[in-house]
Amino acid sequence: MTYDVIIIGAGPSGMMAAITAGMRGRRVLLLEKNDVVGKKLAFTGGGRCNLTNSASVDEIINNIPGNGRFLYGALSRWNNKDICDFFEELGLKLKEEDHGRIFPAAEDALTVIAALEKRMAELGVAVACRTEVTKVLSRAGKIMGVRLRTGKVLCAEGIVIATGGKSYSSMGSTGGGYAFAKTLGHTITPLSPGEVPLLSGDSFTGKDQLQGLSLQDVSVSVLGTKGKRIVTHRGDILFTHFGLSGPAVLCASTFALKELEKRRRLSGESAVDADDSSVRQSIPNKKESDIRKIIPVIQIAIDILPDKKEDEIIREIQNYGQSGGEKSLKNGLRGFLPERLLLYFLRELDLDLERQLKTLTSGEAWSLATLCKNFAVDITGSLPLDKAFVTCGGVSLKEIDSKTMESKLVRGLYFCGEVLDLNGHTGGFNLTAAFVTGRIAGESILRV
Ligand SMILES: Cc1cc2nc3c(=O)[nH]c(=O)nc-3n(C[C@H](O)[C@H](O)[C@H](O)COP(=O)(O)OP(=O)(O)OC[C@H]3O[C@@H](n4cnc5c(N)ncnc54)[C@H](O)[C@@H]3O)c2cc1C
């Protein structure tokens, strides 16, 4: 059997490209090195698959901080609404949750994969799992085919590289697509973690402090030099044993890491992980504050009560004082903040937990309110790329035609999905980018 199109990688972008090319009557072969298709897709959205977002096209682009504008043309042809229609036509019921996030109604990513597989079977797309591509073959600026790990060569006039990024490599995205692209003359912009939990050595990470505490709907700002707010994201956060996670932190992470890198360049430091014990051992006899001075850190500020002004918070504290002034601080202020956070803040302000609430001075109430509005956390780095939700960087978009997803360097070569230098926030924006670029590549390939 000969094929018109070979697609490398059966993630969301590759499957969408395969279906679209199949709908246009192409003979399509989809190659996947895992033993199943959509391995990463199955884990998305905590296994529920947040497959797109109901936001306007402009908002979608704003939520793809890594080169979202590249998608303007593509989204004007096929967008998030079309993704929903596409899946509903395949019989998949969808539902919308907060922040416009769209999930399958069954809350099961496997239903998304099953719908895609069924459509591929109907269209006669040949799917070969456990089949790894090791080289993409070209001659005189024109695509020829691929070589498999077995040594076998398969020929096709059109090849789509849909191999994903480099995060969660155990799911198959090991970054091989970058090597294929580079060998074919493409530029790969530097890779770094995106939408990634942040590291902090602050005391809240200690045992019996804030580990495991989640807060809903707070606001997280990345602070630049002189405390200037670079970006602010609102949403949920999670305190962990290594630092901070949760949607609002993930959204802020790329900006935090960029700022950290900038500080490191300015201070002449190489990128080191301040929480790495070997780094600490290399700076003997230093207090924590000295280590922080040596290793650049940046700060993020968390506003725990973003809908309240400081004076409102002070009045609220005073109201607690009026109703329970005889009680201790820790009991009298119960309900003002989640209990562990309240105790942590009181200790941070050196306030005796057993003191009577009525003895709290207005200055102390002001300090507590200020801490609620501006809880500053030192950030020293992030978890590694392999633990990031998405890869920042990838195949340079300067070398890709945004109308077709075709390489400007090699005829018949197309790219889609995370292998491209595109990265979005959590909330369904990365899968949107994967589906849309897959659709455009599948639509354009071998057009005549
Ligand atoms: C835990 C987690 C949860 C996420 N949740 C969401 C979410 O809810 N919503 C959202 O929008 N985004 C989410 N993302 C991001 C989203 O999953 C990715 O952006 C998306 O999967 C990228 O799709 P892709 O098709 O480009 O690549 P991938 O899904 O990574 O697929 C690439 C495929 O190519 C295969 N492959 C690679 N190299 C070869 C080769 N040489 N030969 C053959 N096959 C090869 C791989 O095995 C893989 O199956 C999440 C990411 C993670 C890690």
Image: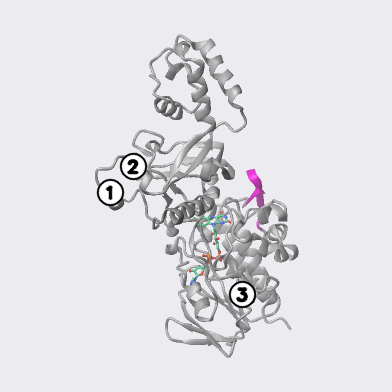
Camera-near label (3 vs 1) is 1
SS of the residue under disc 1: loop
Name the one closer to the observer, 251 or 12.
251
How far across and how far down the image is residue 106, in percent? Answer: 60, 51
Report the disc number at residue 399: 3
Q: Would you say residue 9 is visible in this rendering?
A: yes
The stretch of residues the image draws in magenta is: 92-102
Horizontal arrangement in the rendering, residue 238 relative to residue 79 (left or right): left
The disc, 2 or 3, on the residue closer to the chain's N-terminal end is 2
Q: Residue furthest top?
A: 326
Residue 99: in magenta span = yes
Residue type at tag 2:
Asp
Residue visible at 39% across and 19% down in the picture = 353
Mark 1 CB lies closer than 8 A to ligand 1? no
Q: Are marks 2 and 1 in contact (CB under 8 Å)?
A: yes
Residue type highlighted by circle 1:
Ile
**Mark 2 Cα-neighbour bin, 10 Å: few <14, some 14–19, many ≥20:** few
The CA distance from mark 3 to mark 1 is 45 Å
